[in-house]
Each structure stands twice: as C-alpha cells, then as structure tokens.
Amino acid sequence: MSVEKAIRLLEEARTDLEVGNYNKSASASYFSARMMVEPFLRSRRLSIPRRDDKLANLFENQGFKELSNDLRKLYDIRKKADYLGKFVSREEAESSLVRAEGIVKALMSHLRPDAGR
C-alpha cells in the first residue's frame, strides 16, 4: 500500500461524489484511509491485521482514538456500499470523504510520500 495510491483514491472518491457515484465514493474513501493507516502502522514496526476492526483497534492504541472511530465509521459505510442491498446516500458519501480526508491529512505528517511501497 502506498501513500500515492491513498491520495489517488481520495481524489477518485471526490470525483465519484461529484458525479453522483455515492457507493463508489464511499468505498474509495474507506480504502484511501486504510491505505494511509497501514504504512503508518508499519512505520512503527507493527503487523497489519487482516480484519478491519482489528486494524482500527491497533490504530486507536497508537493514540488516534478519534481517527480510529472515523475509520470504523468509514468501514460501516463501505460495507453498505459494497455488500448490502442498500444505497449510500449523498450525505453518507460526503461524510465519508470528510473523514477520509481527515485521516489522510493527519497521517501525512508521519509518512514520507513514498512510505509503504
């Protein structure tokens, strides 16, 4: 997972939101955030859990309680987008994008642009 790809996914989430692809936007928002969290945890020499809830817990244990809660909310909306028979609303996609942007911005200061490659 690279920081570059996380940023690209964030851009795609923004574009998908603008054109009304709310499910795609929510999914890309989640993966953008996840792809920032993973190299951050690796930079601290931590193993990356496969399960999303375990990843959020490990992130929280590094002192990022609020951002880990945002990651959990992103995952909940991503499940709705990718697995459930319901559609993500514009409001949910917008809030997902804002949460993902917050995580990406917060972790950028901890990672070099090429971290995680």
Image: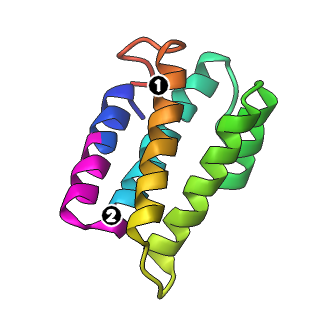
Residue on which the image places disc 2:
24
- Please identify the dominant SS of the magenta region: helix
Give x and y (percent) for residue 37.
Answer: 56, 33
Inspect this view and state whether residue 115 appears.
yes
Q: Are marks 1 and 2 in contact (CB under 8 Å)?
A: no
The kind of residue on which mark 2 rests is Lys
The kind of residue on which mark 1 rests is Lys
Residue lying farthest to the bottom in this orientation: 85
Q: Earlier in the sequence, mark 1 or mark 2?
A: 2
Secondary structure under the numbered disc 2 in the rendered image:
helix
Around disc 2, counting alpha carbons within 10 Å, would you say few (fewer than 14), some (14 to 19), or many (20 or more)?
many
Left or right: 104, with 16 as reference point: right
Left or right: 72, with 39 as reference point: right
The structure residue drawn at horizontal position 52% and vertical position 74%, both measured from the top left corner, is 80
| Quadrant of residue 55 within the rendered picture | top right
Q: Nearer the viewer, residue 66 or 44?
A: 66
Query: Which circle marks residue 85 in the picture?
Result: none
Residue on which the image places disc 1:
105
Q: Is residue 30 magenta?
A: no
Q: CA distance from mark 1 to mark 2?
A: 21 Å
The structure residue drawn at horizontal position 59% and vertical position 17%, both measured from the top left corner, is 43
Secondary structure under the numbered disc 1 in the rendered image:
helix
Quarter holding the N terminus is top left
Q: Nearer the viewer, residue 36 or 42?
A: 36
Give x and y (percent) for residue 97.
Answer: 42, 48
The structure residue drawn at horizontal position 54% and vertical position 69%, both measured from the top left corner, is 79
Quarter holding the C terminus is top left
Left or right: 5, with 66 as reference point: left
Give x and y (percent) for residue 106.
Answer: 54, 23
